[in-house]
Image: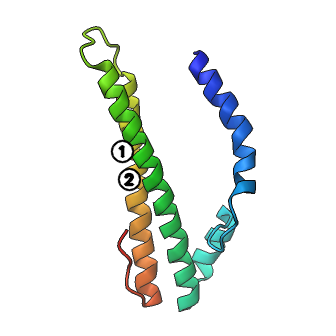
Amino acid sequence: MNRILIAVATLSFTLPFTGVAQPTTPTQMSRQQLRSLIQNAHDAAQYKQLADYYRQQEAQYRAMAAAEKAEWNKRVQASLGGESLKKPNPADSAHRLYDSYSYQADHNADLAAHYEQLAGTTPSKS
């Protein structure tokens, strides 16, 4: 319980500052801007912008998946030999998060490839 409270407190303190430390890139946009661009895209530059956005999202999800994979491995090692582990155990939750992030990364890669095809560019391999 204390670990959860510490994690929430840490995130609530650090999240507001993450936008300050990172430079804004042209592919960062609000959900409303993204929807509008998807609905109104009709030329190669707009499709390229969408592809770049989804490649950026893919990279972020791949990074989160890699971090969660490390956490999953750590939790598996910590739970080895424990006969009376409750189910689901912490390793299971890390595994589900890893799977979720990997799925999101793959989905964003597919979307990026689609928009790269519409833009007439070759999809880049990540």
Q: Nearer the viewer, residue 31 or 17?
A: 17
Residue 81, relative to residue 42: is it above or below?
above
Identify the residue shown where x is 61% and y is 29%.
7
Residue 45 image point, x, y percent: 57, 88
Identify the residue shown where x is 57% and y is 75%.
38
Residue 88 showing in the rendered view = yes
Residue 42 showing in the rendered view = no
| Circle on res. 48 | none
Residue 18, relative to residue 41: is it above or below?
above
Q: CA distance from mark 1 to mark 2?
A: 6 Å
Identify the residue shown where x is 36% and y is 21%.
89
Q: Nearer the viewer, residue 106 or 6?
A: 6
Q: Kindly give the residue lying farthest to the front in the view shown.
A: 21
Q: Are marks 1 and 2 in contact (CB under 8 Å)?
A: yes
Disc 2 target residue: 103
Circle 2 SS class = helix
Residue 51 image point, x, y percent: 50, 76
Residue type pointed to by label 2: Tyr
Residue type pointed to by label 1: Asp
